[in-house]
Amino acid sequence: MTQSMRPYRSVLYIPGSKERALDKARGLPADAIIFDLEDAVAPDAKDAARATLRAEIDKGGYGDRAKLVRINGFDTMWGNADIHAFRGADIDGLLLPKVNSALDIETLAEMIADVPIWAMMETASGVLNARTIAAHPRLAGIVMGTNDLVKELGCRPGPDRAEIQTALQMSLIAARADGIPIVDGVYNAFKDEAGLRAECEQGRDLGFDGKTLIHPDQIAIANEVFAPSEADLDLARRQIAAFEEVEARGEGVAVVDGKIVENLHIVTAKALIAKAEAIEQREG
Ligand SMILES: CC(C)(COP(=O)(O)OP(=O)(O)OC[C@H]1O[C@@H](n2cnc3c(N)ncnc32)[C@H](O)[C@@H]1OP(=O)(O)O)[C@@H](O)C(=O)NCCC(=O)NCCSC(=O)C[C@H](O)C(=O)O
Ligand SMILES: [Mg+2]
């Protein structure tokens, strides 16, 4: 599947140290996986996790879902070893945590060729530099790190996350300006389905491509919320048909359900249908 068509509704973190979870993930319906060597792995377990993860990735079996490896930062004693360990691996990107500026992306780009780079957006500096980070030619996508962001900002977000809306939107606008995917942060209370659904719906309405997840039980809700609904698809098809009809008469505006439909709405309608087709292909 080409990068631009790939769905990112559900992006599951798996600690690189958990062999059972790494194996279980081969059969899980997540659109993408973040194999984590950073915060989910204890310092004493980092070296073993790196080796385990490389062996599991080499074994394969993760299908065509996107495979990202979250490495440790350059300012840690593990970052360099992480980068070298995944040279030549069958992965779709390295995810760099705590990116502060485009220089961080450039530094990683110079250390490893040919691997797409993803950035964690989770520091105050990172958010302020989102525009230039997203514009780096090697950057392939952004993942919001809302836990670190909350820690850095010193805020206490409620269920509507009003306190981090500016950071979410600045990051999203930067990603959209450069046409790269962006995925929302995790919902920590992994047993709270209603809370997860509400946060997924908010992320979807803000424009995010999907949500990062920490537990397999969260996948179904994210897949459902971030997929176009039957009602969305029905409207998109009716808009396309109505527009083709007026276009044939040399007109540029159709009306569907009492609302105008112009060429720009058709671009959105076709993108929605393409997304549904990509999801269908992913789910086989
Ligand atoms: C949250 C957990 C610690 C819960 O673990 P556990 O109590 O073991 O869960 P279950 O017993 O319900 O597990 C059931 C089975 O599912 C497998 N499992 C669990 N989690 C995963 C997973 N993430 N991927 C794949 N498989 C998973 C278990 O192995 C069980 O399998 P089986 O025995 O065969 O039935 C745990 O879920 C967990 O560790 N989650 C990941 C946490 C993580 O990755 N954290 C780091 C990312 S969050 C972050 O850092 C974001 C960002 O940087 C920020 O700043 O916000
Ligand atoms: Mg983080």
Image (cartoon, helix red, strand yellow):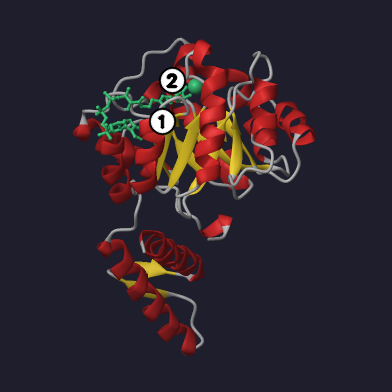
Q: Is residue 157 visible?
A: yes
Instruction: Using the image as rendered, state which of residue 269 and residue 189 is in the foreground.
Output: 189
Q: Residue at x 34, y 49 (%)?
A: 29
Q: Position of residue 216 (x, y in %)?
A: 30, 37
> Is ligand 1 within 8 Å of the beta carbon of the residue shown at mark 2?
yes
Residue for badge 2: 147
Residue linked to disc 1: 19
What residue is at 34 percent from the left and 54 percent from the top? 227
* In the image, residue 128 above or below residue 212: above
Percent x, y for residue 37? 53, 25
Q: Does the CB distance between marks 2 and 1 fall below 8 Å?
A: no
Q: Position of residue 20 (x, y in %)?
A: 36, 32
Q: Vertically, is 90 above or below 162?
A: below
Q: Is residue 63 above or below residue 171?
A: below
Pinpoint residue 225: horizontal percent, then vertical percent.
30, 48
Q: Nearer the viewer, residue 145 or 21?
A: 21
Identify residue type, mark 1: Glu
Query: Does residue 172 show up?
Result: no
Which is more toward the observer, 253 or 139?
A: 139
Q: Quadrant of residue 157?
A: top left
